[in-house]
Image (cartoon, helix red, strand yellow):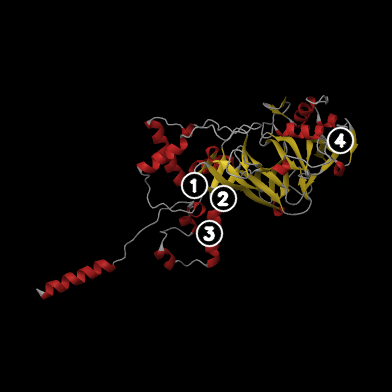
Amino acid sequence: MKRREILWLLTGCMLLFTPIKAQAASLPDALAIGTINITDEISGDEKSGEDKESDKSASREVDGSDDDSISNNAAQDGGSDETSQDEKEDKNAASKSDDTSLQDILGGGSIGSGAIIEATKTEQEYAEAYEKAKNANWGYTNLGIANVDNNLNVRAIAAEDGKLVGKLPKDAACEVLDDDGTWAHIKSGKVEGYVSLEYLLTGIPAKRRAEELATTMARVNTDGLKVRAEANTDSEVITLVANGEELEVAAVEGDWVKVYLDDQEVFVSAEYVEVTSELGTAITMTELFYGQGVSDIRVDVCQYAKEFLGNPYVWGGTSLTKGADCSGYVLSVFKKYGVSLPHSSVAQANCGTTIKVSEAKPGDLIFYGNGKSINHVAICIGNGQVIHASSPKTGIKISNISYRSPIKAVRILYD
């Protein structure tokens, strides 16, 4: 009897000390989002809670001058059983096709104490793995995307009558610092404040939208980068781009990067740019208002021009809403103020009075080109910036005045 009891005791001890093998789910955003799910299924309570958030009425934070109402989003509609099945399939596909997972980065296998004890990677390799996982979410820990038709107001406090501190354009990204279920505390670019959570995509919907929106940019890391017509050093230099400026990437071709310079495809040396994937950010109120010394007419022109920020570029067009090219945009803006301009950047450069670029005020015209041949026009809006119909990919946008070398400035407003 005693022998049997001893055998049972030994068996129990062996079972107690046998390692239990556990694997953590492989989620690529484990570090970026800050959570690790250990189950592949979403409980009914969790899903119904998510649906409740999707069904909020879109009628709260609306700015009189901007369209803050949420755009129609089929992904948030109730739908049938077939729609629910599609959503499940989308989630499963997303989990399989997302950016490199932490497991893959660390060489495969399970993630847990056992994996760490047996790992042979150096501290630097782990640091690089962390950075890679973090950057898989475009540098954001808790990504938010503005889900509006125009601009989302950013306020100093979480209230509809809070002071405006900036605007988050349609599809621009932000870091969601916190939320109370109604307002989100966000940071985007140089802007920090509060936005209505109703008009902000977060979580998986935000990442899916970001994957559609992310633009590959080449950030210049040298002074006076030469932009060439072809991918060789014998090619003509079209213009120079200042240090810190960003150009949208069309393709990387060995030692050269093909970029968009407004509506042209040109080349820069890959040695002098850093290629990254980026999302748009908020606009500060400083970029929207002006100080002393600027006449009312100039402020009005610039404010009117900014109303069409983000609208499409259409070659030969003059519509501020449906699409315009660079000179068509300029002539249509100034038409409202009784100034008649031709539909050509070259012809517009011969209007008014030529001034130094350094003397340009908000409302003056800035011209760019290939060498001394003009092929693009923009409106100076102050603070070292211009607004222009740039290209079919970017539409009407704000850029630094030195995003490429300006070759002429013209004054057509006299005040």
Q: Nearer the viewer, mark 3 or mark 2?
A: 2
Whether residue 189 can be seen here: no
Q: Quadrant of residue 292?
A: top right
Q: Which mark is residue 410?
A: 4
Q: Could you tell me if the residues under marks 3 and 1 are in contact, i.e. CB atoms within 8 Å?
A: no
- The local secondary structure at tag 2 comes to loop
Tell me residue 362's x, y (percent): 81, 38
- Residues under labels 1 and 2: Cα distance? 16 Å
- The residue singled out by tag 2 in the image is 140
- Residues under labels 4 and 1: Cα distance? 49 Å
- Residues under labels 4 and 2: Cα distance? 41 Å
| Dot 2 crowding, Cα within 10 Å, few <14, some 14–19, many 20+ | some
Q: Residue at x 59, y 44 (%)?
A: 194
Q: As shown in the figure, which amino acid type bears the numbered disc 2? A: Tyr
| Dot 4 crowding, Cα within 10 Å, few <14, some 14–19, many 20+ | many
- The residue singled out by tag 3 in the image is 129
Q: As shown in the figure, which amino acid type bears the numbered disc 4? A: Val
Tell me residue 140's x, y (percent): 56, 50
Q: Earlier in the sequence, mark 4 or mark 3?
A: 3
